[in-house]
Amino acid sequence: MENDVTMVWLPLARVAEITGKSVKTIRRLVKEGSLVAVNRTVASGKTHTTKTFIFVHGELLETEMAYRAKQGQQAISLEPEQMSFCSQVRDCLFITSYIKAGEAQ
């Protein structure tokens, strides 16, 4: 069922790295509407910072997941949340970083 699909969001810098584009280009694509982005507050040491996350799907998501599996890494994410997207409420996962599989967070 399509509604059961979790939307995965990656940091803007990681999307730039995966696609081989600059951060500036990714920001331009967001501004043009070619990519969907949202900002979220993320812990950064003793403070917090705002990061831009890009919605990834299809080949881009498959590339990222295959790379992380090959590296033996598992995702660390913000608390899952639900967002209204295209007139439907979807579960969203905002991946902030990765650790070796089996390590404690």
Image: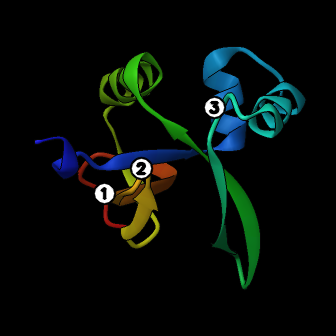
Q: Are marks 2 and 1 in contact (CB under 8 Å)?
A: yes
> Of marks 2 and 3, which one's residue comes earlier in the chain?
3
What residue appears at the point 31 percent right and 33 percent down from the top-left corner?
A: 72
Circle 2/circle 3 CB separation < 8 Å: no
Instruction: Estimate the x, y position of residue 73 in percent, counting from the top left.
Output: 36, 39
Residue situated furthest right in the rendering: 24
Q: Which residue is mark 2?
A: 99
Could you tell me which quadrant the C terminus lies in?
bottom left
Name the residue: 31% across, 57% down.
103
Q: Is residue 12 left or right of residue 65?
A: right
Image quadrant where residue 10 sits: top right
- The residue positioned 80% from the left and 32% from the top of the image is 32
User: What residue is pinned by disc 1?
Assistant: 103
Near-viewer residue (11 or 32): 32
Please identify the quarter of the rendering in which residue 76 is found.
bottom left
Above or below residue 33? Residue 62 is: above
